[in-house]
Image (spheres, rainbow, N blue to C red):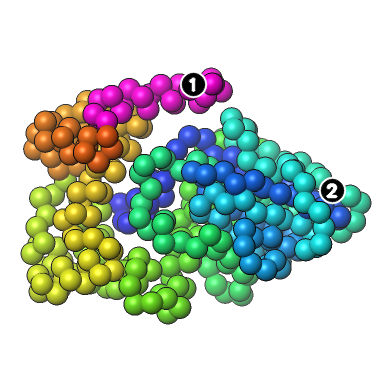
Amino acid sequence: MDLLSDVVALMRTGQPVSALVTWRAPWGVAVPAEPGSAAFQVVLRGSCWLIPPSGEPVPLSVGDVVFLPHGHGYGLADSPGTPLAAGPCEPSEGGALFSSTTSGGTGAETVTVHGSYRKAPGRAHPLLGTLPEVIHLPTTLGRHPELRAAVELLGNEIAQRRPGADTVVTSLLDMLQLYILRAWFETTPGKCEHTGWAVALSDPAISRALDAAHRDPAHRWTVAELAGVAGLSRAAFARRFAELVGQPPLAYLTWWRLATAARLLRESDAPVSAVAAQVGYGSEFAFGTAFKREFGIAPGRYQRQACEEVKAEQTGVRLGA
Protein backbone atom coordinates (compact mmCIF):
# COMPACT_ATOMS: atom_id res chain seq x y z
CA MET A 1 0.00 0.00 0.00
CA ASP A 2 1.13 3.57 -0.65
CA LEU A 3 1.30 6.21 2.06
CA LEU A 4 -2.13 7.85 1.64
CA SER A 5 -3.84 4.46 1.40
CA ASP A 6 -2.09 3.43 4.59
CA VAL A 7 -3.10 6.64 6.37
CA VAL A 8 -6.78 6.00 5.58
CA ALA A 9 -6.54 2.32 6.57
CA LEU A 10 -4.87 3.28 9.84
CA MET A 11 -7.00 6.22 10.91
CA ARG A 12 -10.52 4.82 11.28
CA THR A 13 -11.89 2.46 13.90
CA GLY A 14 -15.40 1.18 14.48
CA GLN A 15 -18.42 1.85 12.30
CA PRO A 16 -18.71 5.16 10.46
CA VAL A 17 -21.92 7.19 10.49
CA SER A 18 -23.40 8.97 7.47
CA ALA A 19 -26.63 10.82 6.76
CA LEU A 20 -28.40 12.39 3.81
CA VAL A 21 -30.24 15.45 5.14
CA THR A 22 -32.81 17.57 3.31
CA TRP A 23 -32.95 21.03 4.89
CA ARG A 24 -35.69 23.60 4.31
CA ALA A 25 -35.08 27.22 5.30
CA PRO A 26 -34.86 28.55 7.85
CA TRP A 27 -32.52 26.01 9.44
CA GLY A 28 -29.32 25.87 11.46
CA VAL A 29 -27.54 22.98 13.13
CA ALA A 30 -24.76 22.98 15.74
CA VAL A 31 -22.53 19.91 15.60
CA PRO A 32 -20.68 19.65 18.92
CA ALA A 33 -16.99 18.89 19.24
CA GLU A 34 -16.20 15.18 19.34
CA PRO A 35 -12.51 14.69 20.21
CA GLY A 36 -10.97 11.71 18.49
CA SER A 37 -13.29 11.90 15.49
CA ALA A 38 -13.29 13.33 11.98
CA ALA A 39 -16.24 14.55 9.91
CA PHE A 40 -17.16 15.91 6.52
CA GLN A 41 -20.07 17.71 4.90
CA VAL A 42 -20.95 17.75 1.19
CA VAL A 43 -23.54 19.98 -0.46
CA LEU A 44 -25.53 18.00 -3.04
CA ARG A 45 -28.23 20.59 -3.74
CA GLY A 46 -28.82 24.25 -2.90
CA SER A 47 -26.43 26.32 -0.79
CA CYS A 48 -25.65 27.00 2.86
CA TRP A 49 -23.06 28.44 5.24
CA LEU A 50 -20.40 26.73 7.32
CA ILE A 51 -19.89 28.30 10.73
CA PRO A 52 -16.32 27.16 11.55
CA PRO A 53 -14.81 26.77 15.03
CA SER A 54 -13.00 30.07 14.46
CA GLY A 55 -13.01 32.69 11.74
CA GLU A 56 -15.69 34.01 9.42
CA PRO A 57 -18.65 31.97 8.05
CA VAL A 58 -17.91 30.24 4.74
CA PRO A 59 -20.46 30.14 1.90
CA LEU A 60 -20.97 26.65 0.42
CA SER A 61 -22.51 25.75 -2.92
CA VAL A 62 -23.39 22.56 -4.82
CA GLY A 63 -20.47 20.14 -4.89
CA ASP A 64 -18.48 21.81 -2.13
CA VAL A 65 -16.76 19.45 0.32
CA VAL A 66 -15.80 20.39 3.88
CA PHE A 67 -13.57 18.14 5.98
CA LEU A 68 -12.98 18.64 9.73
CA PRO A 69 -10.17 16.24 10.66
CA HIS A 70 -9.79 17.04 14.37
CA GLY A 71 -13.31 16.63 15.73
CA HIS A 72 -13.89 20.34 16.39
CA GLY A 73 -17.46 21.59 16.69
CA TYR A 74 -19.01 23.61 13.88
CA GLY A 75 -22.29 24.94 12.56
CA LEU A 76 -24.19 24.65 9.30
CA ALA A 77 -27.08 26.95 8.37
CA ASP A 78 -29.08 28.51 5.56
CA SER A 79 -27.77 31.92 6.64
CA PRO A 80 -24.97 33.12 8.96
CA GLY A 81 -27.58 34.79 11.16
CA THR A 82 -29.83 31.77 11.68
CA PRO A 83 -29.75 30.39 15.26
CA LEU A 84 -28.07 26.98 15.57
CA ALA A 85 -29.66 24.01 17.31
CA ALA A 86 -28.75 20.33 17.66
CA GLY A 87 -30.01 18.53 14.60
CA PRO A 88 -30.17 15.30 12.61
CA CYS A 89 -26.59 15.40 11.35
CA GLU A 90 -25.16 15.42 14.88
CA PRO A 91 -22.79 12.43 15.34
CA SER A 92 -24.24 9.78 17.65
CA GLU A 93 -22.60 6.91 19.48
CA GLY A 94 -23.75 3.59 18.06
CA GLY A 95 -25.73 5.33 15.29
CA ALA A 96 -26.79 3.64 12.07
CA LEU A 97 -24.28 3.35 9.25
CA PHE A 98 -26.44 5.62 7.14
CA SER A 99 -29.76 7.40 7.37
CA SER A 100 -31.81 10.09 5.66
CA THR A 101 -34.07 12.72 7.15
CA THR A 102 -35.70 16.11 6.56
CA SER A 103 -35.43 19.10 8.87
CA GLY A 104 -36.11 22.83 9.07
CA GLY A 105 -38.95 25.04 7.86
CA THR A 106 -40.82 25.33 4.56
CA GLY A 107 -38.46 27.50 2.51
CA ALA A 108 -35.68 26.87 -0.01
CA GLU A 109 -34.26 23.34 -0.04
CA THR A 110 -30.65 22.29 0.56
CA VAL A 111 -29.45 18.68 0.59
CA THR A 112 -26.23 17.67 2.34
CA VAL A 113 -24.35 14.45 3.03
CA HIS A 114 -22.75 14.19 6.46
CA GLY A 115 -20.21 11.58 7.50
CA SER A 116 -18.20 10.99 10.66
CA TYR A 117 -16.11 8.28 12.25
CA ARG A 118 -13.90 7.75 15.26
CA LYS A 119 -10.16 7.79 14.68
CA ALA A 120 -8.12 4.93 16.11
CA PRO A 121 -6.70 6.15 19.44
CA GLY A 122 -2.93 6.47 19.65
CA ARG A 123 -2.39 5.44 16.04
CA ALA A 124 -3.09 8.60 14.06
CA HIS A 125 -0.52 9.22 11.37
CA PRO A 126 1.51 12.42 11.97
CA LEU A 127 0.36 13.60 8.54
CA LEU A 128 -3.09 14.21 10.02
CA GLY A 129 -1.70 16.52 12.67
CA THR A 130 -0.53 18.93 9.97
CA LEU A 131 -4.05 19.44 8.59
CA PRO A 132 -5.94 22.66 9.42
CA GLU A 133 -9.11 22.52 11.54
CA VAL A 134 -11.24 23.00 8.41
CA ILE A 135 -10.48 21.92 4.83
CA HIS A 136 -12.81 23.48 2.26
CA LEU A 137 -12.65 22.06 -1.26
CA PRO A 138 -14.90 24.28 -3.38
CA THR A 139 -16.44 23.08 -6.61
CA THR A 140 -14.16 23.90 -9.52
CA LEU A 141 -15.00 22.81 -13.06
CA GLY A 142 -12.67 20.00 -14.12
CA ARG A 143 -10.93 19.69 -10.72
CA HIS A 144 -10.99 16.50 -8.63
CA PRO A 145 -13.45 14.54 -10.83
CA GLU A 146 -12.96 11.36 -8.77
CA LEU A 147 -13.98 13.21 -5.60
CA ARG A 148 -17.15 14.47 -7.28
CA ALA A 149 -17.95 10.97 -8.56
CA ALA A 150 -17.52 9.44 -5.07
CA VAL A 151 -19.79 12.11 -3.58
CA GLU A 152 -22.52 11.39 -6.13
CA LEU A 153 -22.29 7.63 -5.58
CA LEU A 154 -22.44 8.07 -1.80
CA GLY A 155 -25.51 10.28 -2.01
CA ASN A 156 -27.27 7.77 -4.25
CA GLU A 157 -26.47 4.82 -1.99
CA ILE A 158 -27.73 6.57 1.15
CA ALA A 159 -30.92 7.70 -0.59
CA GLN A 160 -31.84 4.40 -2.26
CA ARG A 161 -30.64 1.70 0.17
CA ARG A 162 -30.19 -1.18 -2.24
CA PRO A 163 -28.82 -4.65 -1.36
CA GLY A 164 -25.14 -4.52 -0.38
CA ALA A 165 -25.40 -0.88 0.68
CA ASP A 166 -23.56 -1.42 3.98
CA THR A 167 -20.41 -2.57 2.18
CA VAL A 168 -20.71 0.04 -0.57
CA VAL A 169 -21.26 2.96 1.83
CA THR A 170 -18.35 1.95 4.07
CA SER A 171 -16.06 1.65 1.03
CA LEU A 172 -17.24 4.97 -0.39
CA LEU A 173 -16.58 6.73 2.93
CA ASP A 174 -12.99 5.45 2.81
CA MET A 175 -12.70 6.49 -0.84
CA LEU A 176 -14.05 9.94 -0.06
CA GLN A 177 -11.51 10.34 2.75
CA LEU A 178 -8.70 9.34 0.41
CA TYR A 179 -9.85 11.69 -2.35
CA ILE A 180 -10.16 14.58 0.11
CA LEU A 181 -6.60 14.04 1.36
CA ARG A 182 -5.28 13.64 -2.17
CA ALA A 183 -7.00 16.82 -3.35
CA TRP A 184 -5.75 18.78 -0.34
CA PHE A 185 -2.13 17.70 -0.64
CA GLU A 186 -2.09 18.17 -4.40
CA THR A 187 -3.18 21.80 -4.06
CA THR A 188 -1.32 22.69 -0.83
CA PRO A 189 2.49 22.63 -1.42
CA GLY A 190 2.64 25.94 -3.30
CA LYS A 191 0.78 27.68 -0.47
CA CYS A 192 2.93 26.28 2.37
CA GLU A 193 6.38 26.74 3.76
CA HIS A 194 9.05 24.48 2.26
CA THR A 195 8.70 21.83 4.98
CA GLY A 196 6.05 19.40 6.12
CA TRP A 197 4.04 16.49 4.78
CA ALA A 198 2.45 18.45 1.94
CA VAL A 199 5.92 19.13 0.56
CA ALA A 200 7.17 15.62 1.38
CA LEU A 201 4.41 14.04 -0.71
CA SER A 202 5.20 16.31 -3.64
CA ASP A 203 8.97 15.79 -3.35
CA PRO A 204 9.82 13.00 -5.87
CA ALA A 205 12.82 11.71 -3.90
CA ILE A 206 11.23 11.61 -0.46
CA SER A 207 7.89 10.33 -1.75
CA ARG A 208 9.68 7.42 -3.48
CA ALA A 209 11.37 6.46 -0.22
CA LEU A 210 8.12 6.75 1.75
CA ASP A 211 6.29 4.68 -0.82
CA ALA A 212 8.94 1.93 -0.69
CA ALA A 213 8.87 1.80 3.12
CA HIS A 214 5.08 1.65 3.20
CA ARG A 215 4.83 -1.03 0.54
CA ASP A 216 7.31 -3.30 2.34
CA PRO A 217 7.61 -2.40 6.04
CA ALA A 218 9.02 -5.85 6.84
CA HIS A 219 12.11 -5.24 4.73
CA ARG A 220 15.26 -4.50 6.75
CA TRP A 221 15.69 -1.03 5.36
CA THR A 222 18.87 0.95 5.94
CA VAL A 223 19.24 4.69 5.44
CA ALA A 224 21.63 4.00 2.56
CA GLU A 225 19.07 1.71 0.89
CA LEU A 226 16.27 4.25 1.21
CA ALA A 227 18.63 6.95 -0.08
CA GLY A 228 19.25 4.75 -3.12
CA VAL A 229 15.51 4.49 -3.74
CA ALA A 230 15.26 8.26 -3.41
CA GLY A 231 18.22 8.81 -5.76
CA LEU A 232 20.12 10.92 -3.23
CA SER A 233 23.32 10.55 -1.26
CA ARG A 234 22.89 9.09 2.21
CA ALA A 235 23.62 12.38 3.96
CA ALA A 236 21.44 14.48 1.65
CA PHE A 237 18.55 12.02 1.96
CA ALA A 238 18.70 11.78 5.77
CA ARG A 239 18.79 15.57 6.07
CA ARG A 240 15.96 16.15 3.60
CA PHE A 241 13.77 13.38 5.06
CA ALA A 242 14.10 14.66 8.64
CA GLU A 243 13.44 18.23 7.50
CA LEU A 244 10.16 17.34 5.75
CA VAL A 245 8.84 14.41 7.77
CA GLY A 246 9.92 15.66 11.17
CA GLN A 247 12.00 12.67 12.25
CA PRO A 248 14.93 10.59 10.91
CA PRO A 249 14.14 7.86 8.35
CA LEU A 250 14.62 4.86 10.63
CA ALA A 251 12.72 6.48 13.50
CA TYR A 252 9.76 7.03 11.18
CA LEU A 253 10.04 3.47 9.86
CA THR A 254 9.99 2.06 13.40
CA TRP A 255 6.92 4.10 14.26
CA TRP A 256 5.19 2.99 11.07
CA ARG A 257 5.95 -0.69 11.70
CA LEU A 258 4.48 -0.49 15.20
CA ALA A 259 1.42 1.48 14.05
CA THR A 260 0.83 -1.14 11.35
CA ALA A 261 1.22 -3.89 13.95
CA ALA A 262 -1.38 -2.20 16.16
CA ARG A 263 -3.85 -2.17 13.26
CA LEU A 264 -3.18 -5.85 12.49
CA LEU A 265 -3.63 -6.80 16.15
CA ARG A 266 -6.86 -4.84 16.34
CA GLU A 267 -8.36 -6.19 13.13
CA SER A 268 -7.36 -9.86 13.27
CA ASP A 269 -6.74 -12.76 15.64
CA ALA A 270 -3.32 -13.49 14.14
CA PRO A 271 -0.72 -14.67 16.68
CA VAL A 272 1.58 -11.96 18.02
CA SER A 273 4.56 -13.81 16.50
CA ALA A 274 2.97 -13.66 13.04
CA VAL A 275 2.27 -9.92 13.37
CA ALA A 276 5.85 -9.35 14.54
CA ALA A 277 7.22 -11.10 11.45
CA GLN A 278 4.81 -9.24 9.17
CA VAL A 279 6.17 -5.86 10.26
CA GLY A 280 9.84 -6.83 10.17
CA TYR A 281 10.74 -8.02 13.68
CA GLY A 282 12.92 -11.13 13.89
CA SER A 283 11.77 -12.10 17.35
CA GLU A 284 8.52 -11.83 19.28
CA PHE A 285 10.46 -10.59 22.32
CA ALA A 286 12.04 -7.67 20.42
CA PHE A 287 8.67 -6.79 18.96
CA GLY A 288 6.94 -6.93 22.34
CA THR A 289 9.55 -4.66 23.90
CA ALA A 290 9.27 -2.10 21.09
CA PHE A 291 5.46 -2.24 21.06
CA LYS A 292 5.17 -1.72 24.81
CA ARG A 293 7.62 1.18 24.65
CA GLU A 294 5.46 2.86 21.97
CA PHE A 295 1.94 2.07 23.26
CA GLY A 296 2.51 1.37 26.96
CA ILE A 297 0.92 -2.08 26.74
CA ALA A 298 2.03 -5.55 25.67
CA PRO A 299 0.83 -6.58 22.17
CA GLY A 300 -1.11 -9.63 23.41
CA ARG A 301 -3.01 -7.56 25.93
CA TYR A 302 -3.61 -4.84 23.34
CA GLN A 303 -5.14 -7.44 21.02
CA ARG A 304 -7.42 -8.82 23.74
CA GLN A 305 -8.64 -5.35 24.70
CA ALA A 306 -9.29 -4.49 21.05
CA CYS A 307 -11.34 -7.67 20.68
CA GLU A 308 -13.44 -6.71 23.70
CA GLU A 309 -14.00 -3.22 22.29
CA VAL A 310 -15.18 -4.63 18.96
CA LYS A 311 -17.64 -6.95 20.72
CA ALA A 312 -18.93 -4.02 22.77
CA GLU A 313 -19.47 -1.95 19.61
CA GLN A 314 -21.33 -4.82 17.96
CA THR A 315 -23.71 -5.09 20.91
CA GLY A 316 -24.09 -1.34 21.25
CA VAL A 317 -22.50 -1.29 24.70
CA ARG A 318 -19.58 1.00 25.47
CA LEU A 319 -16.98 -0.58 27.73
CA GLY A 320 -17.09 0.88 31.23
CA ALA A 321 -20.58 2.33 30.75
Disc number lying in front (1 or 2): 1
Residue assigned mark 1: 320
Per the rendered image, the range of residues in magenta is 297-321
Examine the rendering and report whether any part of residue 290 can be seen: yes
Q: Main secondary structure of the magenta part?
A: helix
The residues tagged by marks 1 and 2 sit, at their Cα atoms, a distance apart of 37 Å
The answer to whether marks 1 and 2 mark residues whose Cβ atoms lie closer than 8 Å is no
Does residue 314 belong to the magenta stretch? yes
Q: Amino acid at mark 1?
A: Gly
x and y percentages locating residue 178 in the rendered image: 46, 56
Tell me which residue sits at (30%, 28%) in the image.
302
Q: Residue at x 77, y 51 (%)?
A: 84
**SS for dot 1:** loop
In this rendering, would 192 be left or right of 35? left
Is 202 one of the magenta-colored residues?
no
Residue located 89% across and 50% down the image: 105
Figure check: 48 above or below 166: below
Q: Say what amino acid the circle numbered 2 marks.
A: Gly
Q: Can see residue 171?
A: no
Q: Which mark is residue 104?
A: 2
Indicate the quadrant where residue 299 lies. top left
Q: Position of residue 314 (x, y in %)?
A: 51, 23
Instruction: Count how many numbered circles sit on residues in the image.
Output: 2
Badge 2 element:
strand
Q: Is residue 15 above or below residue 49?
A: above
Q: Residues within 10 Å of mark 1 (few under 14, many from 20)?
A: few
Q: Residue at point 61% right, 74% down?
A: 140
